[in-house]
Image (cartoon, helix red, strand yellow):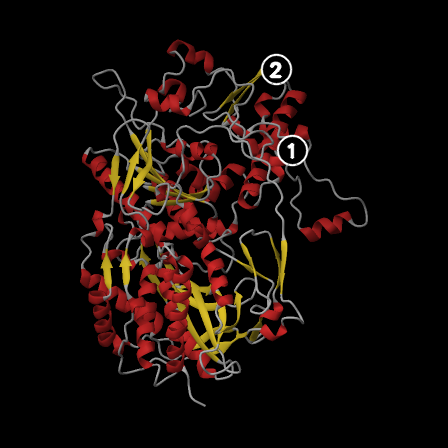
Amino acid sequence: MLYPNDPDSYYAKRELVPAEMLTDLRKAKIVVTNFHAFKLRDRMDLSKGGRALLQGHGAALNTLETEGQMLQRVLPELMGMKNIFVINDEAHHCYREKTSAETAALKGEEKQEAEQNNEAARVWISGLETVKRKIGVALVLDLSATPFFLRGSGYAEGTLFPWTMSDFSLMDAIECGIVKLPRVPVADNRPDVDLPMYRNLWEHIRAKMPKKGRGSGETLDPLSLPAELQTAIETLYGHYEKTFALWEAAKTAVPPCFIIVCNNTAASKLVYDYVSGFRRENADGRGSFNNGRCALFRNYDDNGEPLPRPRTLLIDSQQLESGEALDKNFLGAAKDEIDRFRQEVWTRTGDRQKADRLTDAEILREVMNTVGKSGQLGGAIRCVVSVSMLTEGWDANTVTHILGVRAFGTQLLCEQVIGRALRRHSYELNEKNLFNVEYADVFGIPFNFTAKPVVAPVQKPLATVRVYAVSPERDALEIRFPRVAGYRTELPNETLTAQWTAEAKLVLNPNLVGATKTENSGIIGEKLQLDLEHLRGVRDATVLMRLTQRLLETKFRDDNGEPKLHLYGRLKAIVVDWYQNYFSCVGDTFPAQLLYQELADMVCNRIVNAITAANVGAQPVVALLDAYNAIGSTAHVNFTTSKTNRWKTDSRKCHVNWAILDSDWEGEFCRVAESNPRVLAYVKNQGLGFEVPYRYGATDRKYLPDFIVLIDDGHGAADPLHLIVEIKGYRGEDAKEKKSTMDTYWIPSVNHLQKFGRWAFVEFQRVFEINDDFAKMTERSFAEMVAQAAPACQDNRVER
C-alpha cells in the first residue's frame, strides 16, 4: 500500500496526492524496509564447530557482510542514484543515545527494555549514516506521533526531540476527532486502591505471572491465570460481545478486533490458550480438550475440532519485524494456526506449491497486516494476542478493545500501544460534515492524558546495620524449631465428614477477584460502564458440579491416579453444604467466578482442610521435615539491612540483637513481650529461615509468621510453650489459608513428633483496636493470647 503502483495504494485511496500527480509519483523509485535490515548479517551459515574448524589457530573469522554488501541487499534499486529522500516512520526509535546516571540506575525489566531500545536506535541511525556516507542523502524526515526520548536513552524521559519543527500531538488528534477516542478506567468498586485496578493491571498480577519466555519442556496451565486477570478479560470481553453484536447487526464485513499485549511468550501463550482453547497431555498420557473461555474468540468448535479459519491470532510482532528466523518455541506455540492459514492460502489460490513455498514468518506477517480487511487472510481475526506491542507497520482500523498484560514504565510506551487502536474505522463525514465519534476501550495501560517529562531524582545512600545472634553472651536464649517441608495425611475412602471452622468461609468480593464494575472515560466524550452481568446466567447446579469434579480430580485419586468416582455423591453433599452455609457474594461478584481455577482450588483446599480436621483423631497428620536441614535456630541469624524500622532487643529476652519490623505494631509487641515475666525468650522471624508450607489455590507458597515466643505456661522453664504469633490487622483470604494450615496441619503434625516441645499458634489482632490507653490494652491482649494458646496446645499434644 506504500508503493504507488499497488492497487490499494494509500496515495490514491486516501487522496494523499492529487490525481493529476499520481503518474509522476509512479515514476519514483521507492524502497520500503525496516531498520532491522541495516544490521550486518553473516555471509556464511556456519555451525559453532564448523567455524572453529575453519578458523583453526588463526585470527577470528570475519564473515560479516561489508557496508556496501548490506546496502546492495537492502537498497538495490537506489544504488548509483542521488537525491535520496529518507522518511523515518516511528522515528522516536531513531536517535544517538548518550550515557547518564539515570541510564545506569535502571534495573530488571526497565534496564532490559532500555538496552533493547538503544540497540534498535544504534542499528537504525548507523544504517542511515552508512547510506549517507556511501550513497548520499538529500533530506531526512522523521515522522512520529510521540517524538520523545525513551527511558534509558540518556536524556530526560519524555523530552521532545530538539529537531522537531511541528508536532501534532496525540491529544490534538483526539480532540480533533481524526482518531478514535480512547477510554480508560477512571473509577471502579475497589475501595482499597488509589487508582482504578484496571488502569494498571500489571501491578496487581505481576507476581503471579511467568517471569520468562516459554522454554522447552515447560508446562504452564492456562486455567491458572490470576483471578484478577480472568476478571479483567471477562469484563472487557463482555463489552466486546455487545460491540460484536452491533457490528453484526450493521452487516459489517469484518468483526471488531480485541488486542491483548503481553510481556513475554509464556504469558502470551497462556492468555491465547485461555481465550481460544487448547489441548494438553495429562499425566496418564491421555489428552484432554478445554475450549476457550471467550466464545467469540474460540479457534475450536464444540467437539474440539479446529475451525477452518482461526478467530484468534498469536503473534510475536518483534520477531516478525526483525526479519530473522522465528523462535522455535514460538513456532511450536503457533503451529496449528500457521497450518490453518497455509491451508487457507491453498484453498483461496488453488496453488498448493505457492502455499508450501510461503515461510511461516511470511504467512503470519500477511495475517497480521490484513486484520480487519474483508476477504483477505486476516479478515476473520477477532482477537490478537501479541508479544511486543505491534508498533511497526500495523494498519488495522477495526480495533475496539485493548488489554495490557505487561509493565508500562513510560507514557511513551502507553501511547504507542494505545495507538494501535486509534485508527478510525470510517472516514465518512456525517450530516454535520464531521466524523462520527469512535471509541477504543482500554484496560491495563496506565495512560495519562497530561503526562510530562520525567527526571529521575538522585537517591541518597541508606545506613545499614548488621543483625546477628549474640554469642556466647545470649546463647541461653536460643530458640530452635523444626523446618517442615510438607505434610502427609490419609483421607478416608468411604465415610467423609467435614468439621467447618471460620476459616472455611469465603466471601467473593472485588478485593479477591478484581474490580467487577469499572467506568471507562476519555478526556472528552461518552462514559462507559463495564461489568460482569453476562455471568448472571450461569446456574448454581453448574457451579456445584464443576467444583465437585475439580475436588475429585485434584484431591481424591487412587494409587493408579484415577479419580475415586464412588465418592462423588458424598463430596457433592459436602460441597453443597459449604456453598449454602460458608459462601457468599458481595460487590457485584457472581458464583460463576468460582470456576476460575485459582478460586476453585482455593475452595477445594478449604473443603479438604475441613475433612482432614474431622479425621485428625483417627489418622494424624505427619510432618515431613527438610531432608538436609531439619532443625533451624536463632544461632544462624546473620544479615545486613538498611531498614530503619527496627527494635533494639533486650539482652535478657532475645538471642538476636535487633528485631527488624514490618510495622510499628510489631515494635509495640516487642516492648510488651520483653516486659512480660512469663516470656522466656522471643525472636522476630526475619532472616531466621522459619517457613510454613501451605497452598493458596493451586499454588504452593511459603508463609513466614511474625514471631516465635517461648512462654512459661505453668510447666516450668524446662518445658516452655513455643507460641507462633502472627500480628494481623486486616484478614484477607490468604490469611485464612495460613491460619487453617497452621491449625490443621503444622501445629498437630509438629506436636505429634514429640521431639520439638509443645507448639501453638495465635493471631494477635486486638492490637489494632483504637483505645485511649494503647499500652495497657496491648498488655491485656497479650495475657489473653497466652491464656488462650496454652489449652489449645494441650488439645493438640500427644501424651508420652
Instruction: Give amino acid for label 1.
Output: Thr
For the N terminus, which image quadrant?
A: top left
Residue located 47% across and 49% down the image: 265
Measured from the top left, where is residue 82 in percent x and y? Answer: 61, 15
Q: Which residue is mark 1?
A: 99
> On the rendered structure, is 422 left or right of 79?
left
Q: Nearer the viewer, residue 6 or 61?
A: 61
Assign a secondary structure to mark 2: loop
Residue located 24% across and 33% down the image: 252
Does residue 108 sit above or below 215 in this rendering?
above
On the question of residue 560 being in view, the answer is no
Does residue 628 sit above or below 382 in this rendering?
below
Q: Nearer the viewer, residue 269 or 604?
A: 604
Query: Label 1: how many residues lie within 10 Å, few (<14), some (14-19) or many (20+)?
Result: few
Residue located 46% across and 14% down the image: 25
Total marks in image: 2
Q: Which residue is mark 2?
A: 82
Assign a secondary structure to mark 1: loop
